[in-house]
Image (cartoon, grey):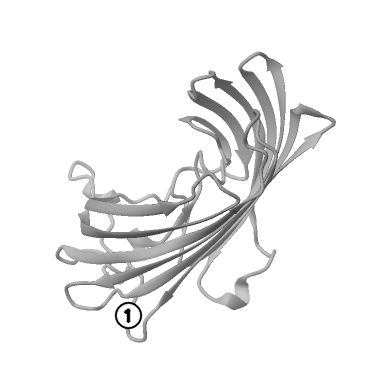
Amino acid sequence: EDEQTYLLNDRSAYSHFWLNPRGLFSFGAQVGWYSAETGPGDDEEPEDTLTDRRLPGFGLPRNDYGVAGGWVEFDLRDKWEEPPVGIEARVTALRFEDLDENNFDFTRIVADIKGYIPLGYRSRILAVRFRTSHSDRESGSLVPFYLMETLGGAKNLRGFDEFRFRDRRNFLLSVEYRWEVWAFVDMTVFVDTGKVFSDMADFNFEDLHTGYGLGLRIHTPGGFRMRFDLARSVEGIKFHVSGGPSF
């Protein structure tokens, strides 16, 4: 009921280097450029457009950023059969430098851990994911709202709308039970929970946003995947259609 719209025009260009991506241990590096311009949203319904200029980065002229960083990944999965089982973990660090006014300089650290446990048969998998992201700003700088990572939607908190929650820090915990129904067709039941926050003191399991649901997966030997998820939370029932694995 309190939704507001805003305009975001952004452009980006990135290049990355990845060493030993199929091995047990790999690392990568990336450099790039990101540009953003924001403003009010839908002109046809101006009463619903975002106008609060206290929001970091909103309503300012175009901002350009230099982005540099890298990641380290440990992949202990058995990847030579489908579906893969085991543990995969990645830590990523990215530096965002405001190339215009130096008002939005910050560093982002992301940890992403995934586990795939066979339950008797390889066609029955318990999949678990824990992901947390922390954006630490420089003294006197802010993290612009459009570069804050979000929770909500088909990729994480499926019981909520896309981009429902955003802040400088977040964490997500997802659990899925996956089983094969027919060849190239899987079903899953899942629970997602997590939250966004500003201060490290709130990095705990209080005041979580939680959703649960049922999903259908269609895949082919060539790697094509489609996902259909029906999820429920305190904000109602959401239906998502997307491609690729949930995690």
Viewer-side residue, 217 vs 150: 217
Residue 173 visible at all: no
Q: Residue at x 28, y 53 (%)?
A: 14
Q: Name the residue under label 1.
A: 141
Query: Which quarter of the image is occupied by the C terminus?
Result: top right
The reply, left or right, for residue 113 in relation to residue 2 is right
Secondary structure under tag 1 reads: loop
Viewer-side residue, 3 vs 122: 122
Measured along the vertical axis of the image, is residue 179 above or below residue 93?
above
The answer to which quarter of the image holds residue 45 is: top left
From the top left corner, tell me how far across and down residue 9 is, in percent. 21, 51
The answer to which quarter of the image holds residue 65 is: bottom left
Q: Residue at x 14, y 65 (%)?
A: 61
Q: Residue at x 61, y 72 (%)?
A: 202
The reply, left or right, for residue 165 in relation to residue 142 is right
Measured along the vertical axis of the image, is residue 182 above or below residue 154?
above
From this viewpoint, which residue is outermost toward the bottom? 139
Count of numbered badges drawn on the protein:
1
Amino acid identity at mark 1: Ser
